[in-house]
Image: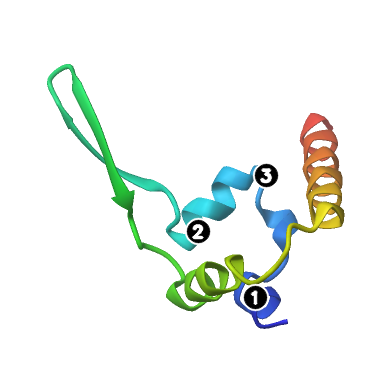
Amino acid sequence: MILVSEIGNITRFLHPRHMMAYLGLVPSESTSSDKRRQGGITKCGNPHARWILMNRHSTMPCRPELAKIWRGVKKANHNASKR
């Protein structure tokens, strides 16, 4: 319930990558000339939600029904953007 209140309505994220960026769970990047190096997570974004996710990840079993819900949200957003 805490995570839901921290993130809000997940339908506002068009892609899972957008939500990961919101949480700061994307790799940092250093680019110089033609070289690109990715580092650890950026930790920009909502620290409370990130803390909840990182701590619950090791204790919660994989829940396939959540993946099904996410796919439905993604499909609905895709169909809405076509209008």
User: For this view, does 8 lie left or right of residue 31?
Assistant: right
| 2 or 1: tag closer to the N-terminus | 1
How crowded is the residue under tag 1: few (<14 C-alpha within 10 Å), some, or many (20+)?
A: few
- Marks 1 and 3, how far apart at CA: 18 Å
Instruction: Using the image as rendered, state which of residue 81 and residue 50 is in the foreground.
Output: 50
Q: Is residue 66 left or right of residue 4?
A: right
Please name the residue that numbered disc 3 is placed on.
Answer: 14
Q: Residues within 10 Å of mark 3 (few under 14, many from 20)?
A: some
Position in image of residue 72 (x %, y %)? 86, 45
Q: Mark 1 and mark 3 in contact? Answer it, CB < 8 Å.
A: no
Badge 3 vs badge 2, beta-carbon distance below 8 Å = no
Instruction: Residue 58: give x, y in percent of width and height.
Output: 58, 67
Q: Is residue 55 left or right of residue 82?
A: left
Is 29 above or below relative to 5?
Answer: above
Query: CA separation, marks 2 and 1?
Result: 13 Å
Q: Residue at x 65, y 42 (%)?
A: 15
Q: Amino acid at mark 3?
A: Leu
The residue beneath circle 1 is 3
Residue type (three-letter) at the residue carrying disc 2: Tyr
Residue at figure coordinates x 67%, y 79% from the top left? 5
Closer to the eye: label 1 or 3: 1
**Mark 2, secondary structure of its residue:** helix
Q: Position of residue 13 (x, y in %)?
A: 65, 51
Q: How many marks?
A: 3
